[in-house]
Amino acid sequence: MVHCSKVWEVKDTGVHRAMELHRTKGRPALLSVVDDVLFVGQVYVVLCVREHRAQQRRRMSAAALRLIRCRRLSTAGPPGVKRVLQWKDLRTFAKVTGAVVLGGCIFITYEVVALDKAVTIDTSAIFQEKYKSYIYLRAKPSDEKENLTAGLTHKTRRELHKAARRFLEISSRLLLQSLDEHFSHIDADPHEVALWVLLKRTQSADKDVRLQAVQELADNHHWHDYQYQTAAQVIDQKTAVGLARTPQVDLRFFLPPPVLPGLEDGASAEDGLRQLLASLPLSEVDKCVQYFTSLALRESTQSMAAQRGGLWCFGGTGLPYAQSLTSVPSEKVESFCLQALVQHSKVQSHCDHIVSNGGLQLLQRVYQLRRDSLKIQRNIVRIIGNLALNESVHQAIAQSGWVSVLAEMMQSPHVMQASHAARALANLDRETVKEKYQDGVYILHPQTRGNQPIKADVLFIHGILGAAFKTWRQKDRTEEEEAAESRDDYTECWPKSWLAADCPNLRVLSVEYDSHLSDWMAKCPAENQRKSLAYRSRELLKKLKLAGVGERPVVWVAHSMGGLLVKKMLLDAAEDPDMHGLLKNTKGIVFYSVPHHGTFMAEYSVNVRYLLFPSIEVRELCKDSPALHNLNENFLNMAKEKEFKVLSFAETLPTNIGPMIKILVVPTQSANLGIGELIEVDVDHLNICKPEKKDSFLYRRSLQFIQEALQSYISQ
């Protein structure tokens, strides 16, 4: 144990020095037999030596491990480690590591913030989606914030909306009632309140409040697209009609026509029209309507094309129908069917049959199919206008999508299209229009709602073979004049364009007879009975009475035989107690080449007479005929008694009625009524009622006469 303790005291000097210590102590035997000592003696010494060597190996392993770790942390310096890693090195390592981690966190945070600013999400779109369940979106950029003024306006409007919303909330609390049962559940944002307030006012029991709300809805053009679509789903039938009759209304206020079901296999729109005609009764219609209805039902497309060959020129020597026309024959058959439906729609009992048998949807299909045919579209809208005379079908018309179609047609650049749509909408508008406009009575002004009060009426009556629009167009230009002047200066109807602008407080009406039967190019067995002055006078008086003509001062403007019709109507009105108002309110008459004493046209050949006038009118127009003489004498006596103001224009140039024929249709002596002023104009019979320009003498003198005749009324 003593030797062993000595070894432990000097164990740091190594094993050899321990052995040297034993040698100096006089134990050589032990040194010589060291290897055996492991097994024989001195066991403790040997064990101590072995333990000492094991401790040295553990110290070397720890040093090697520190060396490896230092090499991994640092790439600088020579390989290996010359010193032991101290605690301050660990602190430096921790600082570097923390700086790297903190810098990475800051960088990532910056990138996230920058990305959030770059990609913004408008959460208001989520609320907008609530109002778009049946809305098709149409991209339209907003220009509200393009400049500073628009931006300030937008902010001011938002503040006003907030104030309006607070006012409505407070008023509803004070009155202890909800805002409205239709709008109380709406959680609109402040900028939505103005729209909902106007929509609420359109449901007011006060008529003036409703009308004002409709006008403000149409005048506000700052609504967003989805707001227009929201309003389209909320507004009722009366509001929709009122918006459609507002000038330049935004068409987004109206829902598109509902989608129509597909046709059965092999079926066509033509077949649908035939079936609709076949379902209508032939009672309460005249013989001409019965004749052409049966014609449209009986003839197929091919047989009709063959039968009607040669009818496109006099004498039956024209080319066959299928070769002379480029239009599809089925389209022509559709036109025949539609013109028959026009006559059926004039009978009130037939209107219910048309609606109940799906006529509104069928007409919608044909309208969409024939968008390139203005004539077919006009006939369809004529039917809708006739149906609208019956208030019982107004809801069906609105539900079938016709209000949006009529609103679009009202903005058509074609005068005839817009006027047909204006008539139909006026018959649908029972809020502001008490008159009813039957087929053939068209509103030229005002065609929309307005604040201008109507003080008097001006009625335009065309002659035989004329029309409500084409008779009153501006004088046709030559090719040289069209090249020299702008087309925008030309008007298709000067009473609508010029007279309405010069006299905005006048109602301008144009009347058309039932002359469309001649468009079918076929002879009706009872057609001659429809062409007498007596028949036309009775029919037009009924229509004018429904249109409210006679309730205000009236000035008549007539061309050719239209002047004879005016005289006949006034004479008939004198005998009808219900029409005395029309006679009393007639203040003046303008005659354009009216054959008061007949025309020399009757002395020409039958072919020439037929070219300009139907046979019965020819007989009535014979020079010095008893019928014309009695008509003129009776009217003169009445005009003098009532003190009518009269202005007459007479033509001085012959009219071309053929390649080799020129005729002075109405000479000056025949155009002279015998009272009033007579003015001769260097124009022919067709252009006597067509001013060349707005500043031409023909128009300026006519305008002056109308203003003088109505001066005491329109100046109030």
Image (cartoon, rainbow, N blue to C red):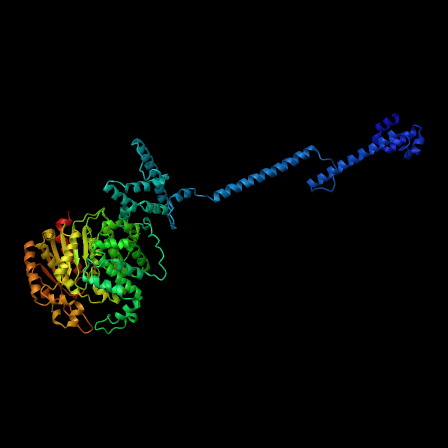
Asked which quadrant contains residue 2, the reply is: top right
Residue 667 is at least partly visible in this image: no
Is the residue 519 above or below the residue 404 in the image? Answer: below
Q: Nearer the viewer, residue 82 or 680?
A: 680
Give the residue at the far top of this rendering.
2
Residue 632 is at least partly visible in this image: yes
Rendering coords of residue 539 (x, y %): 15, 57
Is the residue 243 above or below the residue 277 in the image? Answer: above
Q: Nearer the viewer, residue 411 or 609?
A: 609
Left or right relative to 249: residue 567: left
Left or right relative to 599: residue 2: right
Q: Nearer the viewer, residue 14 or 264?
A: 264
Is the residue 55 above or below the residue 323 in the image? Answer: above
Asked which quadrant contains residue 101, the reply is: top right
Give the number of callouts: 0
Rendering coords of residue 523 (x, y %): 20, 67
Asked which quadrant contains residue 628, the reply is: bottom left
Rendering coords of residue 638 (x, y %): 6, 56
What residue is shown at x 27% (from left), y 53% (from top)?
A: 355
Q: Nearer the viewer, residue 19 or 612?
A: 612
- Of the 4 image quadrants, the one containing the N terminus is top right
Rendering coords of residue 84 (x, y %): 73, 35
